[in-house]
Image: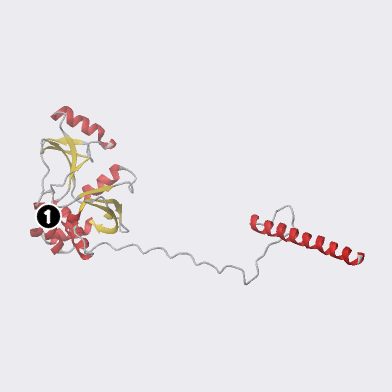
Amino acid sequence: MKWGQTLLAVLCRGTVVVWIAAYLAWGVLTTRTEPERSDPRVTVEPRQSDAAPPVAAPTPAAEPSAVAVTEAALSEGAALLERAGSFPALSCSYDQFPSFLSYAQAMQGLGARFVVVRQRRIVGEWDLASRSFRESAPEGTFSPRARDYTEEPALREVARGARERFGAGAVVMMVVPRSIDAGLFGGIAHELAQRGDQHDHYRELLGRYERGEDGGLRIRLESGRREDGTAVPFDLVFDLGAIASLADRAPAAS
């Protein structure tokens, strides 16, 4: 009887030791993700059946091709420009360029011009290349959607000189060829319609200027904000050089 009690006590103690050992071992495996470097004897290698299968690297998303703007879209955009306020505000950053001057030169290459406007009238043109000013409007047909760059730090001196010369209400703006905005607006309107959407459902479209693989200037439309404030993501690319070339082939649409 005493022998049996002694064995039972040993077994009970042995059971406690096993449970403690198991608990400690479980704690080590769940709290340490790698063996301690101070103990070279300890290695933790998962069994082949427990090893996680290799995860394939994600395939990079394909770069979207530029939207092919058609002559029909160019004509539609020209009609939109005729109707003031019929197209949402288009706000694009140029932070992909090393400087404002780099962006400005790219725009000038497409026919854009920097002008001084006072009381909604162009009173002069500023030439960035020669850093000279002349009191005459640039030649050409320009979009009514001018870009205001009065607060651009790189044009601070230009804006100051314009105000000194023409009064406090003078602003520095960039005007672009009418045909480029016509193709851009018409192309955007067409793409939205293809998605079952409408451009006049939006109050603002947001994007950025960037260089294409061929070095040309593009606009990437990234999102839009509807009239009710809802944000809608996009990824639409428009090649401004291609639009300019299309307009040259179809001047009557611009």
Does 175 sit above or below residue 190? above
Does 158 sit above or below residue 25? above
Q: How is the image coloured?
A: secondary structure
Identify which amino acid the numbered label 1 is placed on: Leu
The quarter of the picture where residue 67 lies is bottom left
Percent across and percent down for residue 219 are 26, 54
Which is nearer the eye, 4 or 52? 4
Percent across and percent down for residue 215 are 30, 55
Q: Does residue 77 appear in this view?
A: yes
Judge from the rendering whether residue 233 lies leftward or rightward of residue 176; answer left or right. right
Judge from the rendering whether residue 96 lies leftward or rightward of residue 11; answer left or right. left
Q: Residue furthest right?
A: 2
Residue at the spot 26% in from the left edge and 37% down from the top edge: 152
The quarter of the picture where residue 250 lies is bottom left
Q: Badge 1 local density, few (<14 within 10 Å), some, or many (20+)?
A: some
Q: Disc count in the image?
A: 1
Which is nearer the eye, 70 or 226? 226
Which is nearer the eye, 88 or 111? 88
Q: Residue furthest bottom?
A: 49
Percent across and percent down for residue 55 are 52, 66
Residue at the spot 91% in from the left edge and 67% down from the top edge: 1
The C terminus lies in quadrant = bottom left
Secondary structure beneath dot 1 equals helix
Which residue is labeled 1 in the image? 80
Q: Does residue 41 appear in this view?
A: no
Residue at the spot 22% in from the left edge and 33% down from the top edge: 158
Judge from the rendering whether residue 94 lies leftward or rightward of residue 183; answer left or right. right
